[in-house]
């Protein structure tokens, strides 16, 4: 089962899992009504809210679910506008999933984020350091990692997670995060030739192309249990790190006449509280992680994908 399957990651993860395990082996679930979405037209889909624990339990039993990829969440920018909702969905939803996992012996993938780091973390963020995020979204992700570790240690629930960087993809829109500029810039460049970027030109953040993120997710979940270490709640993974102006230059070199203005809004504050890049030694050692997409490969894939 994939929760939040109609979102930016779920759209591509569901497709990949269906290719791998068979269409009818992968149940997509979400609270959005999008009848033409490929995850709805392309295989089994059920409306399911992760904060309705009874319904969640019923679907797990009826559909004979063995593994949950728990992607339903409220992202950082939307979460700062509505912190109570963010906490309710992100923490409450994760508890629903972990409780079901405890009762029904499920394996769980529950992603974390670079948002777990706060301004006191080193700018090249290590796997282990104090986690003092200043956003509600980041706090819910720290709680998610701690819950994962507790359910593993107390109940033996095999739950694993990745601290995804900002993810860049074209198959589904980005879902209300701070790193959305790195997706929007490509669409605007090709539609209008111009982008008003909501962070400053020198803002540097860890990013990753979606194909790398999907490969990391499946690879982590396929790793034998005895290889998974204490980072299981949120493995650092590195993709690529660039400033907003480096991204704009890379787009301009591929889309003739493209211009970009930088007008930071409130999301600048969230971006400034996050690291520039990520140390992913634990992922490399424990389950062989290595990214494939650099900035050039990512730009080519985005532009070709949107044009197609
Ligand atoms: P998204 O916003 O694109 O998708 C989330 C989905 O969850 C949406 O389709 C939404 O309808 C659904 N949802 C919301 N409330 C729900 C509820 N109560 N029950 C069921 N579904 C509900 O998000 P995404 O980018 O696909 O992110 C998926 C996960 O990855 C989240 O945990 C997010 O924090 C994490 N993550 C994402 C990124 C990124 O850059 N996309 C980076 C780091 C971490
Ligand atoms: N991309 C996400 C966000 O900006 C990070 O978790 O919210």
Image: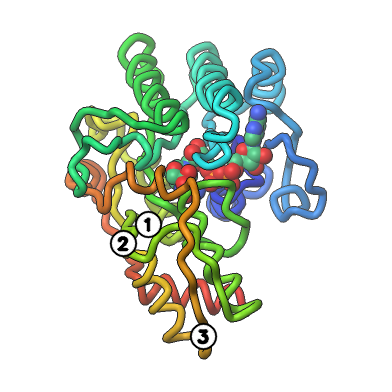
Look at the picture and state if 5 lies above or below 20.
Answer: above
Q: Which mark is residue 240?
A: 2
Which residue is disc 3 drawn over? 255
Q: Percent from the top left, x then y, of residue 126?
A: 18, 41
The residue sitting at 74% across, 40% down in the picture is: 32
Q: Percent from the top left, x then y, of residue 214?
A: 45, 52
Q: Which mark is residue 207?
A: 1
SS class of the residue under badge 3?
loop
> Quadrant of residue 222 in the image?
top left
Towards the viewer: 307 or 81: 81
Q: Is residue 61 visible?
A: no
Whichever of labels 3 and 1 marks the residue nearer the N terminus, that label is 1
The residue sitting at 44% across, 74% down in the picture is: 299
Q: Are marks 2 and 1 in contact (CB under 8 Å)?
A: yes
The residue sitting at 40% across, 36% down in the picture is: 112
Q: Quadrant of ligand 1?
A: top right
- The CA span between labels 3 and 1 is 21 Å
């Amino acid at each position: 089962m994939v929760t939040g399957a109609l979102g930016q990651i779920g759209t591509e993860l569901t497709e990949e899992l269906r290719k791998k395990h068979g269409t009818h082996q992968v149940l997509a679930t979400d609270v959005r009504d999008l009848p033409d979405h490929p995850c709805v037209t392309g295989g089994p889909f059920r409306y399911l809210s992760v904060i309705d624990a009874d319904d969640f339990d019923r679907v797990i039993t009826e559909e004979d679910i063995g593994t949950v990829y728990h992607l339903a969440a409220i992202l950082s920018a939307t979460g700062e506008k509505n912190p109570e909702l963010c906490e309710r969905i992100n923490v409450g939803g994760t508890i629903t999933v972990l409780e079901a996992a405890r009762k029904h012996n499920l394996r769980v993938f529950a992603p974390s984020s670079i948002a777990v780091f706060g301004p006191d973390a080193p700018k090249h963020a290590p796997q282990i350091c104090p986690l003092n995020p200043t956003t509600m979204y980041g706090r819910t992700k720290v709680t998610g990692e701690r819950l994962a570790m507790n359910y593993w240690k107390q109940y033996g629930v095999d739950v694993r997670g990745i601290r995804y960087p900002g993810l860049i993809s074209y198959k589904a829109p980005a879902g209300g995060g701070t790193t959305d500029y790195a997706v929007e810039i490509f669409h605007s460049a090709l539609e209008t030739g111009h982008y008003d970027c909501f962070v400053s030109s020198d803002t540097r953040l860890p990013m990753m192309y979606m194909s790398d993120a999907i490969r990391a997710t499946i690879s982590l979940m396929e790793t034998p249990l005895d290889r998974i270490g204490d980072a299981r709640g949120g493995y650092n993974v590195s993709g690529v790190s660039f400033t907003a102006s480096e991204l704009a230059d890379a787009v301009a070199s591929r889309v003739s006449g493209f211009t970009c203005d930088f007008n930071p809004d409130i999301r600048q504050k969230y971006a400034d509280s996050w690291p520039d890049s990520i140390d992913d030694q634990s992922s490399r050692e424990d389950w062989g992680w290595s990214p494939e997409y650099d900035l050039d490969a990512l730009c080519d894939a985005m532009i070709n994908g949107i044009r197609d």
